[in-house]
Amino acid sequence: MAGVEKQYLGKTVDVKAEHAFDVVKLEQYLTIAIPGFAGPLTARQFEGGQSNPTYLLTTPNARYVLRRKPPGVLLPSAHAVDREFRVMTALGGAGFPVAKARHLCTDESVAGTMFFVMDYIDGRVFWDPLMPDLSPSDRLAVLNAAVDTLADLHKLDHEKLVLTDYGRPGNFFARQIGRWSKQYTQSAANLNPDMVKLMEWLPNAVPGDDSTSLIHGDYGVHNLLLDKKAPKVLAVLDWELSTLGHPISDLLYFLMPWYRPDLDDGRTSFCGLDFKAVGMPTMEEVVARYCARTGRTSLDNLTFYCTFNLFRAAAIGEGIVARARQGNAAAADAASFVESVKAYAERGWQLAQDARA
């Protein structure tokens, strides 16, 4: 399979000063904590936007990945690396593709903050969901593998995985709509008319299907570690947003490039794409494959799920704009989010109107 390779979680750099820790102390700790671990140890930091600083640990005989809470004052429920370790341990035990979780350290004196260590897996990540470096046949094979992997996640029994307390089961969309409506109204300097209409329409349009499963929360090609030579998912990365929720929210989040507006905001849109020519499945084909894999006969109310995700994206964008007004985000980024909030809200309300027709 041809294509540009990217190392696990991206390029590594020297550990940033604000994220540094005592490597010798960590080596001494891990030598006792992880069977077979033996130094000398070197550490480099992965580049990228991970909210939890992530490092490549190299020893003469093995490589590992360390994820830790960032230093400083944090929100109580944020950066929960212990939750990541817990869900990855459960998933690995069930045979789901994740890196093997080796050890969780809650003693902040070792590296400054809580952290966990997992195995390093040599693979590649595509940050653009269009995967422009792949041939049409390879692109289709990778996307099919991605859909199958997501379906397999949703088929897992979270009770057998001892994850019944990993989130609040049931009533997922009603709770999410309430949460993002509140956040949007608190963030917006002026309420967008389309967002106001969506906040009124969405609560009354929630489908009757109240399924609950383990969901990833940020499932996309960018969080899949792929085999370098075959369309195979070696590991699903970044479980920070995982919880118990509605499985179709995960599926339609994965499908956002298929229906998001085409904007100059750095996010890929498949709007106007010749799917057959580039080897991409249509949205309907992805849904059909997912349903066949999960045993669903069909997926009704597709428009609601698309509208919900656009509404959520707009609310998140408005929060970024609000932080920029307060001086907590780059002004250039905020300017692009102003336009994306407007476009996502407009597209969402268009879909809602189509659903009502």
Image (cartoon, helix red, strand yellow):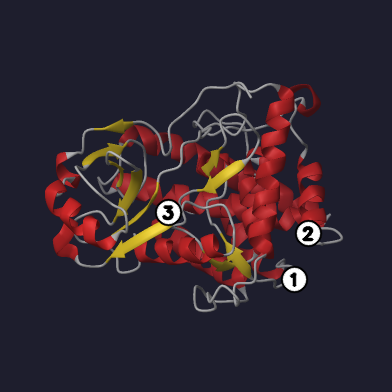
Q: Nearer the viewer, mark 2 or mark 3?
A: 2
Could you say which is closer to the camera, residue 263 or residue 161?
A: 161
Say what secondary structure mark 1 lies in. Answer: loop
**Residue 256 badge:** none
Image quarter for residue 259? Answer: top right
4 with respect to 309 (left or right): left
Query: What residue occupies the far right of the structure in this picture?
Result: 297
**Residue 188 badge:** 3
Against 180, residue 274 (above or below) is above
Mark 2: amino acid: Asn
Mark 3: amino acid: Ala
Inter-mark Cα distance, 2 to 3:
29 Å
Quarter containing the C terminus: bottom right
Mark 1: amino acid: Asp
49 with respect to 282 (left or right): left
Q: Look at the numbered discs 2 and 3 and tell me whether their residues touch, using CB distance below 8 Å.
A: no
**Residue 209 badge:** 1
Q: Position of residue 101 (x, y in %)?
A: 41, 58
Q: Which residue is mark 2?
A: 301
Inter-mark Cα distance, 2 to 1:
10 Å
Quarter containing the N terminus: top right
Residue at 32%, 52% in the rendered image? 67
